[in-house]
Amino acid sequence: MIFKIFKEMVAAVKEGVAEAKAELAEENAVKQVLETQQLDALRNQPQAESFAVALGAPHRWIFIGETAYDLCSTEIAAAKKDEIAKLLIRDFGADSDLAVTGAVLTLESVHYATAMLNVLVARLDGAQTEADSLAILADVERIRTLLATAVAVGEAHRFDSAMIPQLLTNRNILYSEYRSLLKDNLADETKAGLAAIAARASYLTFAGAGIGLLPKEDALALMAPLASAAEAHFSSWADYAEHHEQGEKLDKTNNAIGRKLLRDACRRLQTEPASPWVLFGFSR
C-alpha cells in the first residue's frame, strides 16, 4: 500500500512538472512572438525617430526596461506608465507638456551657451586689436544674457505658456550660433557635455511622450536640434558612449551610484543583441 501511494505521489509530481514545463513553453512562445512583432515594428519605424529615442537608451535601460521595444519605441507599456510619471516628476519636475518642453529647452540652452562662452573667452585672450576684443565681449555679454534667462526660468520651474516661446526663441538662437561658431571643432569636454545632455533630454522627451504628456510629433520636433548635433559630432555609438561617461563625470548633479549605473548601461548597450545601438546604425 505504501509503495502504491508513493508511486501515485511520484506520478502526480511528474504530471505537475510536465504541466509547468508546458505552461512555461507556451509563455515563452507567446513572449517570442510578441518580441518579434515589436522588433518588426521598430524596424519599420523611421530611422530619425529610432535615432532620437536611442540617444536616451542609457536612462531608458535603467528606468524603463532592457528589451529593444523598451529602449527604442516612443510607446511605453501601460503597466509602467505610473512609475515613469513619478520618476519624471522626481528627477525633472516634469508633470505636463510645458514642463517637459521647458526642461529640455533649458538643458539645451545651458549646454550651447556654456560651450560658446568657453570658445569666446579663449578667443578674447588671443584678440589682436581692441576692436576684436570689443566685438568678442559684445558676443559674450549677449550669450550670457540668454544663458541667464534659461537658468532663471529653469531654477524657478516657470514653464508656463508665456515663458515657453521665449525659451524656444533663445534655444533656437543659441543652437544656430553654436553650430556656426563651433562647426566640427568641438572640444572634448564640450562633446562630453553634449552626449550627457542628449541622453538626458531624449529620455525625458520620449518618456514624457510615452506616458501621454506630449504628442510624439512634438517630442520629435523638440529633440531635432540635439539629435542633429549628436549625429554631426559623434562617429558611432561607441564614441557617443565614451563621451557620455565623461559628461556624467563632469556633471556634479548626479551621484556616484547614478554614474555607475549609466556607465554599466552604456557598456551593455554596445553588446546586447536587443540594444538599438547594436540593431541600428549611428545616423538619422
Image (spheres, rainbow, N blue to C red):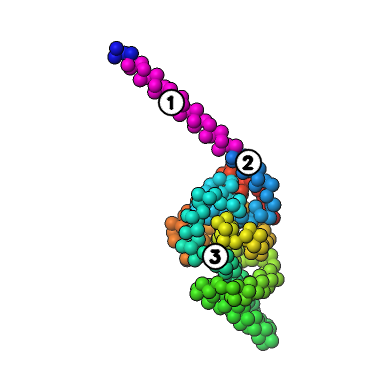
Please tell me in which quadrant of the rendered image residue 20 appears.
top left
Q: Nearer the viewer, mark 1 or mark 3?
A: 3
Q: How far across and down, in percent of the image, does residue 260 sit?
A: 47, 55
Give the residue displayed 68% in from the left and 55% down from the top. 48
Q: How far across and down, in percent of the image, does residue 7 sit?
A: 36, 16
Q: Nearer the viewer, residue 102 or 180?
A: 102
Label 2 residue SS: helix
The answer to if 65 sits in the magenta stretch is no
- Categorize mark 3 by other alpha carbons within 10 Å: few (<14), some (14-19), many (20+): some
The residue under label 3 is 96
Label 3 is placed on what type of residue? Ser
- Categorize mark 1 by other alpha carbons within 10 Å: few (<14), some (14-19), many (20+): few
Please tell me in which quadrant of the rendered image residue 241 appears.
bottom right
Q: Nearer the viewer, residue 279 or 178?
A: 279
Q: Quadrant of the C terminus?
A: bottom right
Whole-angstrom CA distance, mark 1 to mark 2, is: 30 Å
The magenta segment: 5-33
The answer to which of marks 1 and 2 sits earlier in the sequence is 1
Label 1 is placed on what type of residue? Val
Instruction: Give above or below for 2 relative to 13.
Output: above
The answer to which of marks 1 and 3 sits earlier in the sequence is 1
Q: What kind of secondary structure does the magenta stretch mostly adopt?
A: helix
Using residue 158 as the reference point, say whether residue 44 is left or right of it.
Answer: right
